Image (cartoon, coloured by chain):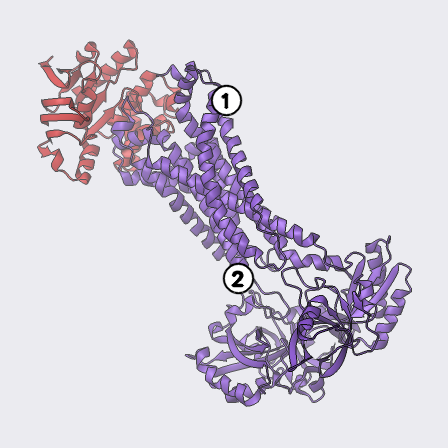
Chain colours: A purple, B red
Amino acid sequence: MLKNYLVVAFRNIRRNPLRTFVHVTGLALGVAVCSIVFQVVYHEYTFDTFHPDSDRIYQVTTTTGFLGESVTNGGVPIPLAHVIADEVAGIEQKTFFYTLWDVNVHNPETDDWFPNQPQVTYADPDLLRIFPRTWLAGDPAAALSTLNQVVLTESAAKQYFPEKPANRIIGRFLEYYFLDTLTVEVVGVVADFEENSDFLFTDFLSVGNLFQERSKDYFSTDQWNNINSSSQLFLKLSENKTPEDLEVDFELIEQKYLTTEDGIAMEFSLSPLSELHFYQNFDRPAANKAMLFGLMVIGGIMLLLAGMNFINLETAQSVLRAKEVGIRKTMGSNRRQLVMQSIVETGLLVIIAISFGIVGSELLVIYFHEFLPTGLDIQYRSWQGLAFFASIFLFLTIFSGIFPALLLAAYSPRKTLGKDFRIPQGFSFGYLIQRYLTIFQFACAIMFVVGVLVVSDQVHYLTKRELGFETERILFARLPFSQVTPEAKRSLQVAIEQQAFVQQTSYASDMLASSGLWTSVIEVPTAEGTEELSVQVKAIDEDFMDLFGVPIIQGKNLRAESKQLLVNETLHNQLSNLQRGSLIGETVGYRDEVYTIVGIVPDVHTRTLREPILPMIYHHGTINSNTLNVIVMQGNEISSAKRELDQLFSTYFPLETAGFRLLEHELATFYEWDLKLGKILTMASLMAILISLLGLFALTSLIIAKKSKEISIRKVLGASVQQLLLEIAKSYMVLMLMAVILGSIPAWMLAERWLADFAFRIPMPIHLFVYAGLLITLLALLIVSVHGIKVASRNPSEVLKGE
Amino acid sequence: MISLKEIDKYIDSRFQRVFILKDIHLTINQGEFVTLMGPSGVGKSTLLNIIGLLDQEYAGTYTFDGKEIKGLKEKQRSALHKAEFGYIFQAYHLIDELTVYENIETPLLYRNVSSQDRKSIIAELLDRFQMVAKKDLFPEQLSGGQQQLVGIARAIAGKPKVLLADEPTGNLHSVQAKEIMQVFQELNRTGTTIIQATHARENADFGTRLVNMLDGKIESDIQIA
């Protein structure tokens, strides 16, 4: 029986290439998108789920409240690690580690340098127990328990000691250069995690070294009020304990150790391991749950569209199969068998579509490679991949197959086989469904198109808006914090300034605009006393404003090594409300010292245009000013300038790999996500349009075939081809109008929400809705007229003779 | 075997009731070859549909082998339908997507006949109608007479007791029509009850009984042989 179903299905698929093409294309697109979305979502949600008892592992986070704003940090004060086991009940195991950056590793035997190792951490032995790894060499019980030891992962060991088996590395020595300098003995080699994990550390140093007396100053190891996201504490709770059970003890710790200063509040809380991947941590960007959700929505809509297309077309052409159903019924088939047959045919089409969908998803991977999480390894044949395709198969087959199948199986043989069988005219449920599905499909298409237009309009606005300073011709380099001395900084600057193509250089804490944010508080004397104002801060030198082409609109530039401030207009306006008269020469308190305001600079966009311009101070500072800004003379090739600067840079800092970067590139990264959003939406709208148009094409061919008699009669009565086309187009215009309205409402709400994120944005672009509506309507009418012209120009005698 | 009593079939339009069949009394015994005759629109097809259980919307009583049809459950009726009836149509109504072999096989599939039995039944039928060479062709590749032979083969594959034929020769020319009628006669001799609707008088000569219909009523009922 199944074989018979398959044979008929297969022949139907072959005999009706247009139908097959439309179905397979539509479904394959839906499958391709869903497959990618599934792979990404599955990848992001399976980080660190494989550790034993991972549901009992929590990260201790610190929330700092400051002037009404609170920030949650994955780090904890280091002393907490010492006291937590004694003061908090319900902890089975804890591990403390302190991640390091800019670590240069030296193998003294071979004299090889391994600069900028990113995954080095101080770790206590429990880190390798709560998150256990396979030991390839060494003694797990003793490792890291005394000073000056290191455990390496296999990949790190291979790097430092190439072509040496793990057990021959034990007992050898390595030197680690960072804020501290350590010579350590390799005591263990462990396997790297094969599963998805954020614990990518490759070098585990004895945490004992961090608690040495001399580290105190570098790492503030004894301070409760210093929180660095590097210092991490993870707990495995005892069985049957929940984070709520530990709250009371944490409150006691907070009362006992944390000094309560005005305006500063600190609080510890527990964040489950499963959430770790969605917070910025260990120097990697957080996975974005909102984006994953958005992707799932898009994938879902695509799948729905594809399924609807199928339903639409199958219901429309079910009358063509009615005869077969009638014959089968007279030969003894029951409804259930007919439904099954129809479903089997749908299933076969879905299988074909899935195989094309896999090809399609490979193409999408190429198009979207920059969006896909790093380390995403697409495995179609893994169990979750197969489970995904199996569920997609079931969903599509049942969702899209059941309605046409029921409709088809309901045909009665008495009617379909009789001599007077006609294609039913007027109202029918199937016809109603087709209309609504068509409207819905086009509404989706319009929604996506509006989305694309709004996003690209806003991004265009963002990138074209004047930021208020020079952005071209500027390069910058960040000097390594750990190794730089004032002399080294100075000699690099002198060397660069000697280059003919360099116009000016300046050391500052940052570029004028970057994604970094440094905020602080100034105290302003007022009539009633002092008022605290939260401000953005940059430490600069005297050449900084000149280099970026920012004029001093009032007062003068600050002098080197002075306690002088430049303020921006926003702060100026705020201060003017507090104090009357000119602000130049007024003093404010900053970092317990008195600073004098000497000049006012215009408001420039030092952050992304998502954010409003903050009140801001610029002070002179050399200690933290490790960003070297360079402006190149007009008329010089910036890429060749970068090459020469990089060369100079590497002679002064041989272990640095980053070198100089273009400010413009850095600024472009502000809107990276928005560009990505635009790209995703473009793809989504193209697909939605394609699916809808394909569906419309096939649907119209059926509807117009039904109407060909009516059209011919009208023609005989004297209608011209244009009049006929207009007649046909009119009925579709109503559909399209409804689709435009239906699609615009969600598009409007989403666009409004998205734009609200930007402090600087375009007004709601109503004209774009009109464009999108017109575009889709025109495309739809074009498709309709292709069929319309064909039928309307046919000789009526051909159509009418058979009656 | 078949007994119709006071069968009415009508359509209620807004102002009046239009009768398609009125007060039909008909009893058909096993082994008869009945010809329903009359012009187009007289109700022959409707009567065949009622006899063949394809139409339940009528008034009156229809008993088949002593069972009152209206009293049967959907499942029983479906089982009866499968076991007892074979259909032949004027327009052949073969499934276009299936080959000759598969078309004949279809009713057997719905009767859950085992694969081996199916093969032997179909082989025998193909042989009987001399269509072995054509078994892999599709309906559109056959002439009308050949298509109708396939239709007959398909109808009798399930070994029905009653064969219902609605204008079986309506689309055929006279030579082909005669062949089909001879096949019917042959089938009747081996015990199959045949009821055919036609408006060609010469076809009636192959049967044993002629029922003339006019305006939804039975006008005359004559034994031929």
Q: Earlier in the sequence, mark 1 or mark 2?
A: 2
Report whether A540 appears left or right of A446: right
Q: Which residue is under mark 1? A: A722
The answer, for residue B15, to whether it is visible in the render is: yes
Picture quarter with the C terminus of chain A: top left
Chain of the residue that carries numbered disc 2 in the rendered image: A
| Alpha carbon distance from label 1 to label 2 | 53 Å
Against A576, is A706 above or below? Answer: above
The crowding category of the residue bearing disc 2, from other C-alpha atoms within 10 Å (few below 14, some 14 to 19, many at least 20), is some
Report whether A170 appears left or right of A360: right
Against A38, is A304 above or below? Answer: above
The answer, for residue A361, to whether it is visible in the render is: no
Judging depth in this view, the residue of A525 and A506 nearest the camera is A525
Q: Residue at x 72, y 62 (%)?
A: A604
Q: Which residue is under mark 2? A: A289
Task: Give residue A571's position: percent from left, percent from top.
Answer: 69, 70
Which label number is shown at residue A400?
none
The crowding category of the residue bearing disc 1, from other C-alpha atoms within 10 Å (few below 14, some 14 to 19, many at least 20), is few
Residue type, label 2: Lys
Report whether A133 appears left or right of B91: right
Q: Secondary structure at mark 2?
A: helix
Name the mark nearer the viewer: 1 or 2.
1
Task: Give residue B88's position: percent from left, percent from top.
Answer: 25, 23
Q: Secondary structure at mark 1?
A: helix
Picture quarter with the N terminus of chain A: top left
Q: Residue at x 37, y 23 (%)?
A: B139
Is label 1 on the same chain as label 2?
A: yes
Report whether A696 appears left or right of A141: left
Q: Marks 1 and 2: CB-CB under 8 Å?
A: no
Judging depth in this view, the residue of B182 and B143 nearest the camera is B143
